[in-house]
Structures are given as structure tokens and as C-alpha cells.
Image (spheres, grey):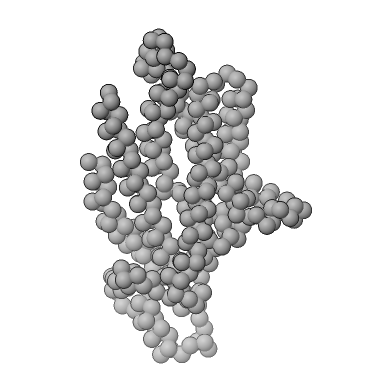
């Protein structure tokens, strides 16, 4: 039911996002064309250019002009860069996806084992050290580490030539603490469940109990991943701006600063679509996992 419900709401959700973003972007005073002086274009040329860009007419007319072109795959012209928006997206979308996926993998591959270990052996020195590192991740903002890496790159050439890797490490650092705390809480709660104590009483080995814990923890991890998906790209975009990587981050910053509406809307809608697809896939995995779990029980 959850998957079908999500599938039904997929396109209406994207439509609502596009309407909201378009209205919020459009109601801001001025636009890119209004920043051009009269010496650059005459009044007639300016009017023709605004009409070609769909900037004439009422708010509804401007929105449906943009939506009709977007549905045909035409995102318009980026006036800030003087290129077609789809060409800019093809150039920067894949590096953005790569950075986001690498950050997510690093974050989950470190947070899940750390949370499992701490929930299983919370009295050891290693578990206390991991907990301390998680709290440090929550306490110190990611731009502090990014600024430190930028400063060190002046003296260490390896860092300046591997900013993509540095950005992935900063992204992992910024998301590790929160994810670790949430997972540790859930894993600790699972450890105290009656079925885990029953397995111990019945003589199941530590390894068997651990595998059982993993099977019950998998739906929890999928649920947390679904909650984490809305911020899947935002962290990578902010970090790529700091390191000036060849991703959508610098494009998005320039588009906002110069009020390049077509580029702003294309980035927001495409990333929102990818997030919705990710949540739909996570819903399907969670549905299949819970269905199989109930059949086993």
C-alpha cells in the first residue's frame, strides 16, 4: 500500500514542488534581465528577449510556459552562462551524483558498523572513543574541517589535487555523527527486545544472535535512509561550493546570485525528482523486506 501510495503521489508531488519553487523564485524583485543596462539592449530588444524567455504575461502564464518547455526536455537558456540549461546539466549532473553517492556510502559504511559495535559492546574503550568522535562530528560544523583542509592544501600539494576526495571526507564527517546516534539508539533498543533475550536463553551463539539482529535492523536502516534522502544532495552541493568542484553546487550558487530562473528551477526540479525516485525505491525495498519478515514469523 505504501509503495502504491507513493507512486500515485509521485507526479503530483513534483508538480507541487515546481509550482512552489517557481512562485518563490518569480516573486523576488528583479531578475537577470532587469540587471542589464539600457546601453546593452534597447527597450524593444529587451521586450523580445523577455518574451522569448517566457518572462511576459501573468504568473500563471509564465509558469505554464516554463512547464510546457520542461516537459519537452527544454529547460531554457541560462542567461548567466549564455548556454542551454540542459547542456550545463549534462556537464555537471553526473559529478554531483557521484559525489553524493560517495558521501552517502562513506557515511553509512562507517556509521552502521560503529553503531552496531557500540550497541553491542558499550563498555569498551573503543566504543567510548567512537561515541566521542560522533559527538565531535555533531559539535564541530563541517565548514570548519573544510576550511582546515583548504588551509592545509597550501602546504600539502596532495590535498589541493584531490579536492573531490577531501569533499567526500568532509561530507562523511558532517553526516556521521547524527546517523551514528540514531542508529545506535535503534540498535540498542533492538538488543533489549524480548526475542533477543530469548535467543540467548535458548543457547544461540553470539554469531547467530548478531545475524538475527542484522535481519531485524535492516528495515530500520531503510527507514532511516528514507528520512535521510531529502538531504542527499544538499550536503554535496554546499561542500562542492566550498571546494569549487565541477558539480552543480557552483552553478546553483551563481544562478541564485544572478537570479538565473531557468537554471535554478532546472536544478531544483531534477534533484527533487531524483529524491522522489530514491524514496520510491526505498519504499519498495522496505515493503519487500517487511513482507518477507512477516512470512518468516
Q: Nearer the viewer, residue 157 or 256?
A: 157
Q: Where is residue 90 in the image (x, y as percent from the top left)?
A: 46, 66
Residue 113, x across and y down, in percent: 52, 31
Q: Quadrant of the N terminus?
A: top left
Which image quarter holds the C terminus? top left
- Based on the displayed image, in which of its 4 quarters is residue 22 positioned? bottom left
Q: Tell me: residue 219, above or below residue 119.
A: below
Q: Where is residue 287 in the image (x, y as percent from the top left)?
A: 29, 38
Q: Quadrant of residue 222?
A: top left
Up-down: is 154 above or below 254?
above
**What residue lies at 26% left-to-right and 42% top-to-bottom?**
2
Comparing 208 with 279, the one in front is: 208
Q: How many marks?
A: 0
- The answer, for residue 253, to whether it is visible in the render is no
Q: Is residue 71 above or below residue 206?
A: below
**Residue under the point 41% across and 83% down:** 49
Q: Where residue 30 appears, x then y in whole percent?
A: 45, 73
Horizontal placement of 15 versus 39: left or right?
left
- In this view, the residue farthest toward the right is 155
Q: Is residue 214 visible?
A: yes
Q: Residue at x 49, y 37 (%)?
A: 179
- The residue shown at (58%, 29%) is 131
Q: In this view, does 191 lie to the left or right of 154?
A: left
- Figure check: 171 above or below 76: above
Viewer-side residue, 154 vs 210:
210
Amino acid at each position: 500500500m505504501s509503495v502504491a501510495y507513493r507512486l500515485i503521489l509521485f507526479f503530483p508531488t513534483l508538480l507541487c514542488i515546481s509550482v512552489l519553487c517557481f512562485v518563490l523564485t518569480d516573486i523576488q524583485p528583479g531578475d537577470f534581465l532587469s540587471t542589464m543596462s539600457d546601453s546593452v539592449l534597447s527597450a524593444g530588444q529587451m521586450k523580445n528577449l523577455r518574451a522569448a524567455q517566457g518572462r511576459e504575461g501573468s504568473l500563471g502564464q509564465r509558469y505554464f510556459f516554463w512547464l510546457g518547455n520542461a516537459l519537452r526536455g527544454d529547460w531554457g537558456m541560462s542567461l548567466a552562462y549564455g548556454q542551454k540549461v540542459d547542456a550545463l546539466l549534462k556537464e555537471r549532473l553526473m559529478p554531483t551524483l557521484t559525489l553524493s553517492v560517495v558521501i552517502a556510502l562513506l557515511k553509512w559504511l562507517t556509521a552502521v558498523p560503529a553503531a552496531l559495535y557500540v550497541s553491542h559492546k558499550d563498555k569498551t574503550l573503543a566504543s567510548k572513543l567512537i561515541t566521542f568522535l560522533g559527538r565531535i562530528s555533531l559539535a564541530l560544523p563541517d565548514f570548519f574541517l573544510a576550511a582546515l583542509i583548504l588551509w592545509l592544501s597550501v602546504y600539502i600539494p596532495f590535498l589541493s589535487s584531490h579536492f573531490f576526495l577531501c569533499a567526500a571526507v568532509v561530507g562523511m564527517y558532517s553526516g556521521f555523527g547524527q546517523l551514528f546516534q540514531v542508529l545506535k539508539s535503534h540498535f540498542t533498543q533492538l538488543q533489549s527486545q524480548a526475542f533477543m533475550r530469548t535467543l540467548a536463553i535458548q543457547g544461540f551463539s553470539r554469531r547467530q544472535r548478531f545475524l538475527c539482529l542484522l535481519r531485524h535492523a535492516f528495515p530500520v536502516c531503510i527507514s532511516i535512509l528514507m528520512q535521510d534522502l531529502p538531504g542527499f544532495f544538499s550536503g554535496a552541493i554546499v561542500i562542492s561550493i566550498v571546494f569549487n568542484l565541477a558539480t552543480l553546487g557552483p552553478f546553483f550558487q551563481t544562478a541564485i546570485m544572478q537570479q538565473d530562473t531557468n537554471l535554478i528551477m532546472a536544478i531544483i526540479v531534477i534533484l527533487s525528482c531524483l529524491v522522489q525516485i530514491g524514496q520510491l525505491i526505498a519504499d519498495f525495498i522496505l515493503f519487500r523486506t517487511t513482507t518477507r519478515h512477516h512470512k518468516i514469523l
